[in-house]
Amino acid sequence: MPAIMALYVRPLTEQERKALQALAHGEDRIQARWAQIILLSSRGIGVPKIADTLGISAATVRARIKAFNEHGMDALVRGSSPGRPVTISPSLGDKLAAVMREREPRDFGWADTGWTLDLLVKVATLEGWVESISREGVRLALKKSKHSYRKLKDWRRKKQAQTPAVEPHETA
């Protein structure tokens, strides 16, 4: 049976040990956890025991040890996270507001007489402005572009009430 290779952190310098101890007790919880992994490994504690002790996965422990062995203290510097990409922009809200002002749901083949958030969701996806969006996403897009769904809807109703209905002429 082949011997199982254990992964441990390389020997630490005294300067690294002091810096790791400071990080382990610091305010950044993620950096503290990473420092704890390195310190525990330097004491000869194996990956499974470190994972159990800290309540994290063994894969995370291995990744942190490997990163430290390769990059030293630089492996403990946290980069910025890109975060979720922006999908709701003010320009989307402007497009939706323009649709509410200038077009009718019937222009899109729907029998509805007034705009609803659900219909605006359909317009945004059918027009290819977004891949997908929720009703709340539509409301937020309007809000980001300084429009209010409620005010646009009320404006539309008032405008329709002011426009006299055109009656067909009777031919005799």
Image (cartoon, rainbow, N blue to C red):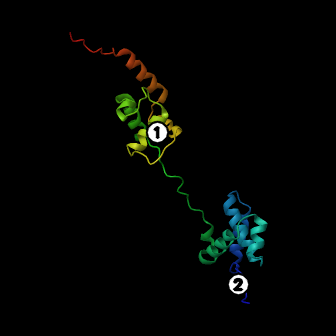
Residue at position x 68%, y 66% in the image: 34
Please state the horizontal and vertical placement of residue 117, each as a whole percent of the image: 49, 34
Residue 123 vs residue 65: left or right? left
Of labels 2 and 1, earlier in sequence is 2
* Residue that extends furthest to the top in the rendered view of this protein: 172
Question: Could you tell whether 54 is left or right of 108 in the image?
Answer: right
Nearer to me, 20 or 155: 155
Q: Which residue is mark 1?
A: 121
Q: Which of the pair 100/18 is nearer the observer?
A: 100
Q: In which quadrant of the rendered image does the N terminus lie?
A: bottom right
Q: Residue furthest left?
A: 172
Q: Callout 1: helix, strand or loop? A: helix
Q: Residue at x 30, y 14 (%)?
A: 167
Q: Nearer the viewer, residue 137 or 113?
A: 113
Which residue is the extreme one toward the bottom?
1
Above or below residue 10? Residue 161 is above
Asked if residue 72 lies left or right of residue 38, the reply is left
Q: Residue at x 69, y 74 (%)?
A: 15
Above or below for 156 versus 61: above
Numbered tag placed on residue 134 in the rendering: none
Residue type, numbered disc 2: Met
Q: Which residue is mark 2?
A: 5
Q: Secondary structure at mark 2?
A: loop
